[in-house]
Each structure stands twice: as C-alpha cells, then as structure tokens.
Image (tube, rainbow, N blue to C red):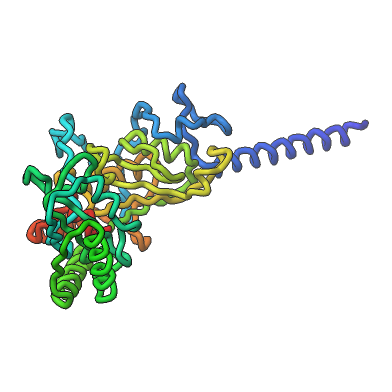
Amino acid sequence: MNSLLLGLSIAGGVVLAGVIAHGTWTARKRAPKLADTEEGTRGSAGALDSASLSGLSTPHHKNDREEPVLYAGTKPLPVEPMFDVAQFDSELATLPVLEKKLSLDPLIDVLTAIDLDAPLTGDAILAALPATRRVGSKPFAVEGLREDGLEWEVPRPGQRYTSLQAGVQLANRTGALNEIEYSEFVIKAQNFADAVGGEPEFPEMLEEVARARELDAFAAAHDAQLKFVLRAVGVAWSTGYVAQNAARIGFVAGALPGRMVLSNPVASLPQLVTLTFDSQAAMADDASHSAIRELTLSLEVAQVARTEYPFARMRECAKALAISMDGRLCDDQGHLMSESALDSLAVDIERLYDALDERDLSAGSMLARRLFS
C-alpha cells in the first residue's frame, strides 16, 4: 500500500471515529435525566430498581446553581429555597385526633325519622339494610340512636338502638337530588322501615329538591380543583428521576403507576397534594429509558383543611421541583405562572375557605369531603 492510500485510510478512520463519537454524545445528551445511584453518581441504563419508584428518601444534594429561579413569562424570577413545613404547622409532630365519622347531617342530607315500637339490635338492623347504599347517584345511609341515648351512629353488631333515621345526600359532583331520585329514596326507606317494623316520616319532596338545587349551586361555585403543570425546559426526565426528586421533598408512591402523593398527617384523610405523570412510562420495563416531559401537581381545595396549608405546600413543592429538575411552572392551560399570579391565587383560595366556613362546610371537614366528591 502506497503512502497516499495509507494516508486516506487513516483520515477515513479518524472521520469515522469522529462521527461515532458525535453520535454517542448526541444520544447521551438527548437521553432522559436519570436518578442518582446509591453512590450519588449519575445512574446508567438499568441501574434503577423498585426502590427509586417507591418513594425511597434520599439525601438532598446541594443545587449547583448560584441563584434558584422559577421560570415565569420570558424572564426567570428569583424564588426562596424550599420552605420548612414546621414554620406553617408546628403541631405535625403530634398527630391530630381522628374525626368521628357520621354519615348523616341535615346540612347536606334529606333525613327521614323512623320510629320503633321497641329497641332493635344492630344485627337485626344490618340484616334488613338494602343491598345497595345508593339512590341514583347519591349515597344512602341509615343510622341508629344507641339505647343509652348518647349518640347516633352507623348500626353495629352487639348494640341496641331505640330510633333510626334514613337519609340521602342532597348533592354531590354529579348534581342535585332530583324528583326521581327522591321518589327512589322514599321507596327504599319505606321498604327498610317495613322490614324492621318502623314507621317513617318523610319531609316534603318539593322543599327538599329545592334545597338540593340551592346546595348544588353553592357547591358548583366553590369547587376548586387546582392543577400546576411542570414542563421540562431541555432534556426529558426518566420516571426514576421524577420519583427521586419528588421523594426528596416528601412525596411517596401512590396506589397507581405514575402517581405520588404528599400524605396527610392523618392516614385516613385525603392526601394534601397529588403528583402525576405518564402512567405508561411508569409501567415501562426499563424506567431509565422512559422519557417524561411534564408532570402535574393537583390539589382538591375543599378536601383538605386550611390548617394544613395545602396551597402553600403545593406552591413550594412546584418551585422546588422546577429548580431541581430544570422545569417551567405552568397552569393547566399551559400559561407560565408568575409570582404575582400565584399570590393572587392564594388570596382567592383564602376567600374560598372563608365562604366554606360561613356555610359550616369547612374545607377538610367530613361534610365538605362528602359534598365535593
């Protein structure tokens, strides 16, 4: 081989190596961001396990940026670092007492008193209950007054009850109780009363239907379901990367793929904030290869007590994720959220809380959770 051919071969090899190197670099640059491994280095493909997707807490790594920013409009706005939950609620260390779960209340239910000739056992009442606990789209329930006269409760085996009451909810997110549903309630309650030897007394249908419509109108005007969307600015995220960053600020894995929650201090109460992302990506065989470009933070305002500061937590969680994951915070319509827009939203939420309080339907209460469901 002469020197010319040798030179051309060497040059061709160099060019080919350059093309391969550039392709490899481009592929790595476009690959989803991966979660850190246990050693704190960048994870490689296949390095993630189920722990990274189950809300496993990891040490918080210091952000390399000199000034954290939240993207809003065309210019980044400076934001404060992640808040300390203790400054909002110093009582988190002591779990609150579980709320007594009563099924019926005249504020949101049609109530029908059922007089009994003699006390009945809880076992007899339970045996006579209808097979379904709904009237149309509304919950139906029966409660009994204990023989000691202290309180109404859902009938229990071994207890004795001197009076009963049946009820159906006036409104929920399916709408107001209508005439047809009221008639179904009368039939169901009458059949139950006949089975236990009781005598029911039904309220006037037109009055109850009118009350249902008024309550439904109030609920529709005060049913706030907030959503923030966090969108990747540059490189997409892997599911493990999302889970790891969310876990660092308190989120844990939810019951469904692609769902994480900021839990309520009381396990039986609704979660404070929900984080969701592509469920198909969450179920992928190799989580490191799944590409996610946006996630959603949502809050059911009426479901969570204002004393838990759910909007403040949702807002600061969104800021923290925007910083750590290099994302832009938008509303559910895709518009970038500015600090002034968030402040205005916080004022509106406080007004909503006040309106619910005035109606004795405080956010997070059992009645509010039933009405806004």
Q: Position of residue 282 (x, y in %)?
A: 50, 44
Residue 348: give x, y in percent of width and height: 16, 60
Where does the C terminus fall, quadrant-wise?
bottom left
Q: Where is residue 84? Give x, y as percent.
A: 20, 35
- Which sits in the foreground, 322 or 117? 117
Give residue 351's position: percent from left, percent from top. 12, 59
Q: Is residue 146 left or right of residue 41?
A: left
Count of marks overlaid on the render: 0
Q: Is residue 347 visible?
A: no
Name which quarter of the figure residue 367 lies in. Answer: bottom left
Question: Where is the N terminus found, in terms of image quarters?
Answer: top right
> Looking at the image, which residue is at 31% across and 36% down?
249
Name the residue furthest top.
39
Direction from residue 307 to residue 270 in the image, left or right: right
Q: Is residue 207 left or right of residue 20?
A: left
Res 146 visible: yes
